[in-house]
Each structure stands twice: as C-alpha cells, then as structure tokens.
Image: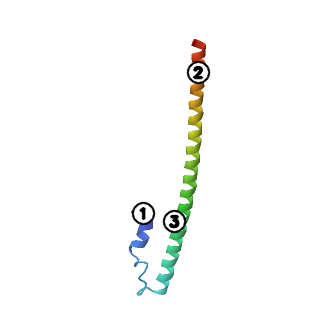
Amino acid sequence: MSSFQNEFDDSPSWGSNAHAAPGDILRDAMRKEALIKEITAGQEDLRALVGRVQSLQDEVEKLTSGNEMLQMYIENLSKQIKG
C-alpha cells in the first residue's frame, strides 16, 4: 500500500469533521491541498505525455508514408531497368 494511502486510512472521512479538533481540521485541509496539487501536477504531466505521443504518432505516419513512396519508386526503377 502506498504511503499516500496510509496517510488517509486513519483519518476521518473528508466530509465528517464534527469530532475533529481545529488542528486536525487544518492538517486535513493541508493534506487535501497537497493531494490536489499532486493530482493537478500529474494531470499536467499526462497531458504533456499525450501530446508527445500524438506528435510521435504523426511523425511515424509521415515516415511510413515516405517509406511506401520510396518503395514504389524503387520498384518502378527496378522494372525499368529489367524491362
């Protein structure tokens, strides 16, 4: 189990602060804020990775198309030389 999960296992649920001391409420709020920042940073990293993957896919498609065209050119030259 991750340490991140362990931090929240012993704490009351986020919506139930009725019996929590003010220090506990503040600590929970700080943990939630840190978690939200971590999630947001992770989402931004994922967006960057998705953009990079799309860019690489586009590059692969261009290279594949170029290879197909070169292969046809080579085949046509081979036919002209033989014919």
Q: Picture coordinates of residue 54 (x, y %)?
A: 56, 49
Q: Secondary structure at mark 3?
A: helix
Question: Sequence order check: which comes first, mark 2 or mark 1?
Answer: 1
**Rendered image quadrant of residue 66:** top right
Q: Picture coordinates of residue 29 (x, y %)?
A: 51, 78
**Rendered image quadrant of residue 64:** top right
Question: Sequence order check: which comes first, mark 1 or mark 3?
Answer: 1
Q: Residue at x 59, y 30 (%)?
A: 69
Which residue is label 2 attached to?
A: 76
Which of these two is toward me, 11 or 33? Answer: 33
Label ID, residue 39: 3
Q: Secondary structure at mark 1?
A: loop
Q: Residue at x 56, y 21 (%)?
A: 75
Q: Amino acid at mark 2?
A: Asn
Which of these two is toward me, 37 or 70? Answer: 70
Gap between marks 2 and 1 measured at Cα: 60 Å
Which residue is label 1 attached to?
A: 2
Q: Amino acid at mark 1?
A: Ser
